[in-house]
Image (tube, grey):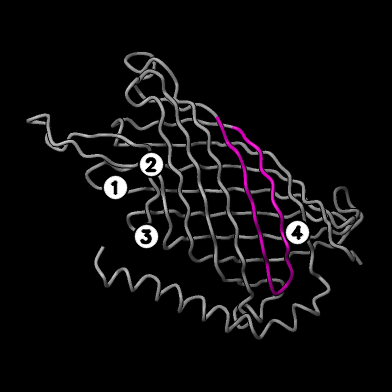
Amino acid sequence: MNKTKAIGFPLLMLLSFVSTISFAQEEVEEIKKDRKQNQYILLGSNFVANVKSRDAAFSPLTYSGMGIGASGGYLNTSDHFEFLIDGGFNFGLMYTDLSGSTDTGGNIYYTIPVHTHALWKINPVFSGTKGASLKLGGAIDFLGNYRGNFSYTNSALNFEYISGFGLGGQLEWDVSIGKTGKFFRKRDRDLTFLWSISLPLMGSYMRPSYNTISDFTTGANFLSGGGQQEFAFIGKLVQFQSRLEMYYKLHNLNAFRLQYEWKYYAVNEGSSGTSKGAYHRLGLAFMFNVTGNKK
């Protein structure tokens, strides 16, 4: 990476966060006075509808499958500020088109995604739309992927540890449905719809140690790679996460969260290969309100 990129990315992040903080400073006093601030502990389960993975350093095959898992986290949210740390654990099996022939077994996988963000409301945006708001800030994403396929003795186990720091944003819309006395609407309902994204701009990764042949015509010139923590900017290391969520708020101030999450990652190591993957995950979580003063 040249010096221009090395300087440009930190400068871009610095300017972005300075801009965000300048907006947030106007909201500090309002946050202190905000009576709608709530804190939640989140516990839930997940269904991975589709997961794909391809590690060119070990195999040209693309694996896909499904899985299940669990999640947990902490949420502190108000009209003006939100802090979230949300983690989980997914596991299942992935297969290729060659499964049952040369590929005699499934690829067992385990995934540990962790996401955290701090977002501030950008006041001028959606100021004239009731219940709608935009929040911007910073986000940190971690992803641990583990795969095992014992059909291939030379690449039976492989993994990635990926962490990234960058920008986060969230669109939020609160909806209240008044009671009508009819079935399912004998009481008023409060819903919140959210779309949040995060894009790390820099981070680090670790891949397993391996040797690969750079010139297959001679079978020589081995290149070693992986096995140590590497720092990278966006491009060599890519992560993107998008979430669609709905909070169904109960009258005891607890809530349910229905979530759809799509996550993509890629580690581009050049001559030693590219590792990439993505998943689509559905989740249902109970949000237990632990706010000290609930009234």
Query: Are the residues at dot 2 and dot 1 in contact (C-beta closer than 8 Å)?
Result: yes
Q: Residue 208 lies in what quarter of the image?
A: top left
Q: Which of marks 2 and 3 is nearer the N terminus?
A: 2
Q: What residue type is labelled 2?
A: Arg
Which element carries disc 2, helix, strand or loop? loop
Which residue lies at the image location 34% right of the left edge and 21% below the top edge? 152
Between disc 2 and disc 4, whose residue precedes? 4
Please tell me which of labels 3 and 4 falls first in the chain.
Answer: 4
| In-front residue for pair 250/90 | 90
Nearer to us in this view, 257 or 168: 168
Q: How far apart are marks 2 and 1 (CA)?
A: 10 Å
| Kind of residue indicated by mark 1 | Glu
The mark tally for this picture is 4
* Residue position for label 1: 269
Q: In which quarter of the image is the C terminus?
A: bottom right
User: Disc 3 vs disc 4: which is toward the camera?
Assistant: 3
Query: Which of the marked residues, 1 or 3, is nearer the chain's N terminus?
Result: 3
Q: Nearer the viewer, mark 2 or mark 1?
A: 2
